[in-house]
Amino acid sequence: MQNSLSRKRSRVFWLAALLAGTAGGQQSPVEASVHFESRLRPWDGFGVNYVESCQTRDYRKTPQDYGGFHTLSPEQRERILDLTFGSDGLKPGLVKMFLDPFHEGMTKPLANGASRFDHETTTKWLRYFVREGLKRTRARGADLQIVTTMYGPPPWTTKQKFMRGRDLDPAEKEEVARYMISWVKYLRDAEKFPVKYVSLHNEGEAFNRWPADGGTAGTPNHDYNMWWPSTQVVDFLRFMRPMMDQEGLQDVGLTPGETSNWEAFGRWYAYFIQTDPVALKNLGLITSHGFGLGLQANNSLGVDVLRLSRPDLHAWATSMSFGKMDVSFVEMVRQNIYASKVNALIPWAYIQTDDWTGGDPNPGTAFWVDGKGHYTVEQGYYLLKQLSRAGQPGMAVADVATSDPNIQAIAFAANGTANPDAFLVFNLSEHASTAVRVRVSGTGAKSFDAYVTGFRKQYDPLGAIPVQNGALECAEPPQAVVTFFAKR
């Protein structure tokens, strides 16, 4: 009872302090609006990504588990899985799984056949994470969609014949396709995972990561890549789709790989796919990593070009940075949703260790594992929780507007699902608390349950906020995000 009373006093004090900062007639509230009846596109959900082998050049000499699960106890792993996939966790709808370059050996096998592939040695903890996550997800009556991305091809399939070679050996292009197909079939047949998409590459547009002649593997801090010119992407879309169909993978979609951001996708790939009828027909999903802020990174030009001919196409951001684990992360998500027009979003490296040569250039994460048997829940987890529980699979992106660039909003309409209408309001200012009046339409809710992260809070409940005369009012602290769930 005392703890409950203490929490209530803390919440009242917190709200009073915020309201005091906006009282005294200083300014009128910022006006915002959420239009649940204006549904912009279907929403497939938020996702998570466990990264295992990502940099080592020789797994036999230097094994790698970047997620660090091998250093934790079974009880610690179970706790992270519950916090992620459980009913009180993030409840993600998507998972990304990497295909590393080691499943077929460092040199070309002498014989063909399924036995030449080893899909288990380098993926133990990745498969464990997904297997246990799927079990928890289905236990609460939901399911996952999995996209698997070829992080890099076997080294002998490149012209350079070493790990992280820049250029595809044209004579091995069908072998690279078989490499991906074998992995998908293993995940579906052996693990019974619901793989929905296979993605051709990881940041394959970044030709500048090698010298002009492609002569080195790059510096040790680089993860796996191969250069994927636009013509190569189009070629794979043309010939790999029939190969997948022949292997019984008709219901697995093919993506054009994952550029660093949406601007790069529009610049390097979209036009070439759109102008090739076979490639366009065979495309199953548009993908990009979604890194960066501003129109130079986030715009929908490439997505729009393809949707002119294929309005059915969905787009997923598949590896977006947690950044500094502050509200700028939520703003990056908002730009991916409203500027780049995505249907889903998966951040980069949901669980991290210090096992990245030179330090991960995107060190924000949800869980930090110290490699000594301990982990911490990071601020990135709570920010993603604010988003993921609001934007559940099957909902729809709803239209929003605000009168102040420091105050932004994201909204998801229930769209016939059992999920409540939900929206987020966040304050990009680092200094000022701001009163906000949010006008809501297209919902029958008379009040919204609110949760906050930021301002020394981590997904803390704020209680029910009433809707009066079609609007609700709240105080937004600096660098904080509040999520509102419609009460039934």
Image (cartoon, rainbow, N blue to C red):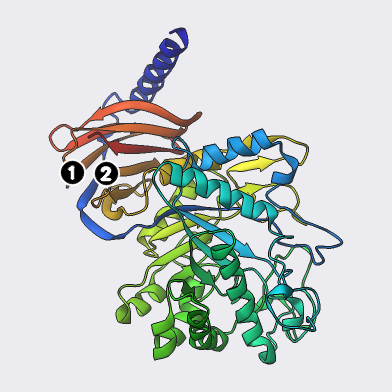
Classify mark 1: helix, strand or loop: loop
Determine whether 328 is above or below 251 in the image: above
Position in image of residue 63 (x %, y %): 80, 57
Q: Which mark is residue 86?
A: none
Position in image of residue 56 (x %, y %): 78, 62
The one nearer the camera, 8 or 149, is 149
What is the quadrant of the N terminus in the image? top left
Q: Is residue 91 visible?
A: no
- Name the image quarter holding residue 115: bottom right
Q: Which residue is located at x 40 percent, y 48 percent? A: 142
User: Which amino acid, mark 2?
Assistant: Asp
Classed neighbour count for the residue bearing mark 1: other residues with Cα under 10 Å, few (<14), some (14–19), many (≥20): some
The residue singled out by tag 1 in the image is: 443
Q: Which residue is located at x 68 percent, y 65 percent? A: 119
Classed neighbour count for the residue bearing mark 2: other residues with Cα under 10 Å, few (<14), some (14–19), many (≥20): many
Is 416 left or right of 215, judged from the image as shown?
Answer: left
Q: Which residue is located at x 17 percent, y 47 percent? A: 442
Determine whether 65 is above or below 29 in the image: below
Q: Which residue is at the far right?
A: 61
Q: Of the residues under marks 1 and 2, which one precedes in the sequence?
A: 2
Is 115 left or right of 431, judged from the image as shown?
Answer: right
Q: Which mark is residue 421?
A: 2
Q: Are marks 1 and 2 in contact (CB under 8 Å)?
A: yes
User: Which amino acid, mark 1?
Assistant: Thr
How many marks the image carries: the answer is 2
What is the quadrant of the C terminus in the image? top left
Q: Is residue 309 visible?
A: yes
